[in-house]
Amino acid sequence: HLSLADLVYFLICRDEVFQVEWDPNHEGLLASSSADRRLMVWDLNRIGDEVIEGDDEGPPELLFSHGGHKGKISDFSWNQNQPWVISSVAEDNSFHVWQMAESIYNDGDDDDIWMGNTNTN
């Protein structure tokens, strides 16, 4: 089981991390960008979830990985008005506005839609 300290260690040792930002709409979610040109979305609420043997998608805390940039990500930001939407810019002069598919945070049961503690401010 991965602790918060383990996750931080994983982030640091995986590659050089350039930016980390909390999701303003969902408690426990954060995004990070690193030298591998990926923007990763982490769900800290999943710390301690069972690790599935042979799962190549990473630890259970890794909710999503956006790998569309060809250059280092210069900056990114969560959309405060549209949950699950992130914009990112990179040194390859690309600007992406993207939203994770609902299937990533919803397992199909309406009662289980991941909403966390939503911020209504």
Image: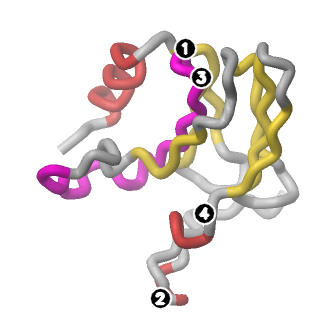
Q: CA distance from mark 2 to mark 1?
A: 36 Å
Q: Residues within 10 Å of mark 4 (few under 14, many from 20)?
A: few
Residue drawn at point x = 59 percent, y = 22 percent: 37
The furthest residue to the top: 16
- Residue 109 in the image, given as x and y percentages of width and height: 47, 88
Q: Secondary structure at mark 1?
A: loop
Q: Residues within 10 Å of mark 2 (few under 14, many from 20)?
A: few
Q: Given contact means CB atoms under 8 Å apart, are the residues at marks 2 and 1 in contact?
A: no
Residue drawn at point x = 63 percent, y = 56 percent: 26
Residue 35's label in the rendered image is 1
Query: Does 10 sit left or right of 118 as displayed?
Result: left
Q: CA distance from mark 4 to mark 3?
A: 29 Å
From which residue to which does the magenta span run?
34-54
- Residue 91 in the image, given as x and y percentages of width and height: 78, 14
34 or 1: nearer the viewer:
34
Q: Amino acid at mark 1?
A: Ala
23 or 41: nearer the viewer:
41
Q: Given contact means CB atoms under 8 Å apart, are the residues at marks 1 and 3 in contact?
A: yes
What residue is pinned by disc 2?
109
Q: Is residue 108 above or below residue 75?
A: below
